[in-house]
Amino acid sequence: MLLHFQDAAKLKTKKVVYEETFYARDSGTLEQLKELSSRRRAVEESVNGSSFITAAIAREMAGGTTSRIQQDLQKLELYLPLLENLVMSVESVGDKYQILQWTTNLKIQWTSALNSSPAFSLGGPKFFRIDNLRFELGMALFVYGALLRERGLEMLCSDFVESATLFRKAAGVYEYLSQDVLPPLEPKLPPERPPEATPSMASIMRLVCLAEAQAVTVRKAEEKTTSISLLAKLHYGVAQFVEEASNLLRSSVADWNDISDRFRRFLSGCFVLHEARSQRYIASDLKAEEHLGLALGVLRCAKSNFQGRLPGEDSWRQIFRQEIDALDQMLRKCEHENEFIWHDKLPSLDELPLLEGKKIVAPIAYRPFGLDREFLFIM
């Protein structure tokens, strides 16, 4: 089972109306601005949970899909091409005063789901305002990637291949954010900014999605007659993706004021779980080769890594308990066999086999939708 961290999609935003701020020179531009506002309003209602349409109407509007996540993805897929086109058009004009003023008047505001500050206070959720269209594009894409992750989790019960594909697509969105969208915005960010608006956080989320894609791939491999040694390497490959994300989180501390403790615990928990699963497979392989002493050493090391690491979240605690129970069961069996049959000497920590990882997943590249519509403004 995967640890579920669904906070990344829990963003909120405030109303944005493009045609009231940007002065269109012709009717075509005005219609495009109105369409932008309409698509943006649909996204607002999704992320804010403020839509009043019935489930039946929502299903009909989404082409029959009953998945709320899929419905929300479709709304973003209608908004993003228009927004990308506007950003491209505005940036081609340059930093003209009128454009900057219009962008300021949009009052683009989003909350953060990864900031450690309380999401809600007496005055409501904390909003970050950054007067730049790339901020709007970055946050919309961040939500899109987060919803692809959610859809990947949703598909986990029915289709491993599709689930892994969705996680890889999410990784591609975050890769695009970290390499193309957010770097030009970074110098213009104020000291108080949401982590979601930084290239480093997008890179971290890319690694998280790749870890999840590989974890699903391992689940699929476990159903087949995959070699035990390969399964051990694949699980440790998941742990390596997570470890890389954790290291980047620590090294990027200057990029944001604070970060969610729950997100840190999620990364730590994922690493411990998949490291333990790798160690269980290694121990199984050693046992099959009649190296009971080494198998016992690996299992005891794996169990010791859980000391003081049991999470407070009920759903996470249940997954940890399942892994600990599996370790205990295997450990008791190996101890019994070693005591009565093999009498192998227990190794020191230095004598245990080194864990080896294998990464087999890569992002599916995000391609901008590439609309080529001309915006004409009164300058």
Image (cartoon, rainbow, N blue to C red):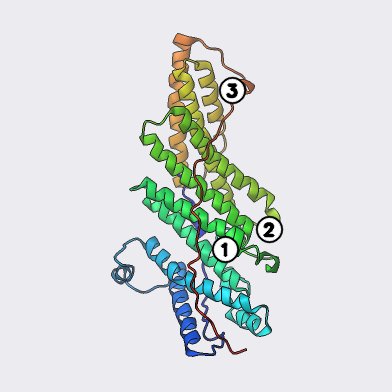
Say which residue label 1 marks: 112
Looking at the image, how many numbered discs can be counted on the residues? 3
- List x then y, in percent, for residue 112: 57, 63
Which residue sits at x=47%, y=38%?
320
The answer to whether marks 2 and 1 mark residues whose Cβ atoms lie closer than 8 Å is no
State how far apart marks 2 and 3 are (Cα): 38 Å
Image coords of residue 344 (percent x, y): 52, 12
Quarter occupied by the N terminus: top left
Which residue lies under the disc numbered 2?
255
Q: Position of residue 345 (x, y in %)?
A: 56, 12
Q: Is residue 198 left or right of residue 312?
A: right
Earlier in the chain: of badge 2 and badge 3, it is 2
Q: Nearer the viewer, residue 172 or 71?
A: 172
Q: At 47% from the left edge and 81% from the top edge, which residue is drawn?
A: 32
The x and y percentages for residue 22 are 56, 85
The residue under the point 49% across, 31% down is 232
User: Could you tell me which secondary element the residue under label 1 belongs to?
Assistant: loop
**Can the viewer see residue 192?**
yes
The residue singled out by tag 3 in the image is: 352
Looking at the rendered image, the disc whose residue lies closer to the viewer, 1 or 3, is 3
325 versus 146 height, above or below: above
